[in-house]
Image (tube, rainbow, N blue to C red):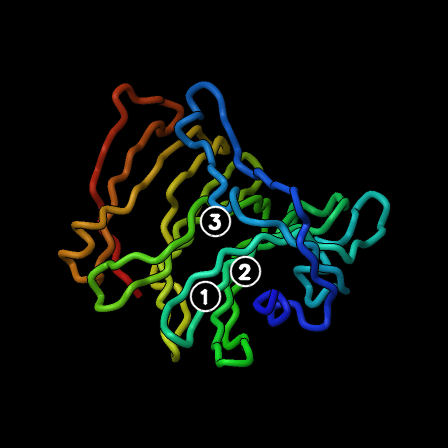
């Protein structure tokens, strides 16, 4: 509750006992390889009541049919400890009841927090892409060979005729909190042609590169309307910022 009070100051916060949210996306046929899990499916749900704090929240709170607004968020939280006095909070939430615009159906937010024996303070904040965003696919720290652990977050988004999930590799330190790399881990488009691919982080090869490059196994399931059997597999590496 103390972390949520820091994230949503002066708001009414309560636990929604028995409430469970599953925002996973199952797909059928050839597209099942692009299914989106919900990485926060087992997290407790909290009700947070208060006026919208910024433009993204104002968008997500607005029912585009009735033009009414909601002040009630349903929030899930994953809390990770980075050091003795530093926490990372990963928040995923939507407003209760409204039918918002596709540019802001829900919000994913990362907070860097400083803790003392009596308080928690938000030092930095990062909001992820909200367009057709439903859920976070995975959240956690990993040793990529850079000397300290990095935060890895997978987040989905989409557009007309396309959707994807992106892996964000985030540098976390008392003086820094920014993405080193953003790479699509699932991608589908049927705009000019039908294309589908997945990518998985190769931790061993990335550690060999000491995190200067981050290496993946990429599986191309379809390109230019052709589905491959077997799929085409490559092993790209991408430079970190």
Q: Position of residue 157 (x, y in %)?
A: 52, 45
Q: Secondary structure at mark 3?
A: strand
Asked whether 161 or 198 is in front, the reply is 198
Mark 1 Cα within 10 Å, few/some/many (few <14, many 20+)? many
Q: Position of residue 130 (x, y in %)?
A: 58, 52
Sequence-first tag of 2 and 3: 2
Asked whether 15 or 36 is in front, the reply is 15
Q: Position of residue 94 (x, y in %)?
A: 66, 50
The N terminus sits in image quarter: bottom right
Q: CB atoms at circles 1 and 2 under 8 Å apart?
A: no
Mark 2 Cα within 10 Å, few/some/many (few <14, many 20+)? some
Q: Is residue 229 above or below residue 43?
A: above
Q: CA distance from mark 2 to mark 3?
A: 10 Å
* Residue at far left of view: 208
The residue singled out by tag 1 in the image is: 88
Q: Nearer the viewer, mark 3 or mark 1?
A: 1
The residue singled out by tag 2 in the image is: 109
Q: Position of residue 31 (x, y in %)?
A: 44, 25
Q: CA distance from mark 3 to mark 1?
A: 16 Å
The residue singled out by tag 3 in the image is: 155
Q: Nearer the viewer, mark 1 or mark 2?
A: 1
Numbered label tally: 3
Label ID, residue 151: none
Mark 3 Cα within 10 Å, few/some/many (few <14, many 20+)? many
Q: CB atoms at circles 2 and 3 under 8 Å apart?
A: no
Q: Residue at x 50, y 77 (%)?
A: 123
Q: Residue at x 34, y 58 (%)?
A: 141
Q: Is residue 123 above or below residue 77?
A: below
The C terminus sits in image quarter: bottom left
């Amino acid at each position: 509750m103390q972390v949520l009070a820091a994230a949503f100051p002066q708001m009414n916060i309560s636990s929604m006992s028995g409430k469970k949210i599953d925002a996973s996306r199952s797909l059928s046929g050839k597209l099942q390889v692009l299914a989106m899990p919900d990485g926060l499916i087992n997290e407790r749900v909290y009700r947070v009541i208060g006026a919208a704090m910024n433009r993204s929240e104002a968008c997500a709170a607005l029912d585009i049919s009735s033009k009414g607004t909601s002040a009630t968020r349903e929030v899930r939280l994953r809390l990770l400890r980075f050091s003795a006095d530093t926490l990372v909070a990963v928040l995923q939430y939507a407003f209760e009841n409204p039918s918002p615009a596709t540019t802001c159906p829900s919000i994913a937010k990362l907070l860097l927090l400083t803790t003392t024996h009596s308080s928690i303070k938000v030092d930095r904040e990062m909001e992820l892409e909200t367009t057709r965003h439903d859920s976070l696919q995975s959240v956690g720290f990993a040793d990529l060979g850079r000397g300290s652990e990095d935060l890895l977050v997978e987040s989905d988004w989409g557009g007309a005729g396309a959707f994807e999930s992106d892996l964000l590799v985030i540098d976390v330190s008392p003086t820094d909190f920014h993405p080193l790399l953003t790479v699509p881990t699932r991608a589908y488009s049927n705009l000019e042609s039908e294309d589908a691919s997945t990518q998985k982080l190769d931790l061993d090869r990335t550690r060999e590169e000491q995190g200067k490059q981050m290496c993946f196994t990429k599986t191309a399931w379809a390109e230019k309307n052709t589905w491959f059997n077997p799929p085409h597999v490559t092993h790209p590496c991408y430079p970190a910022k």
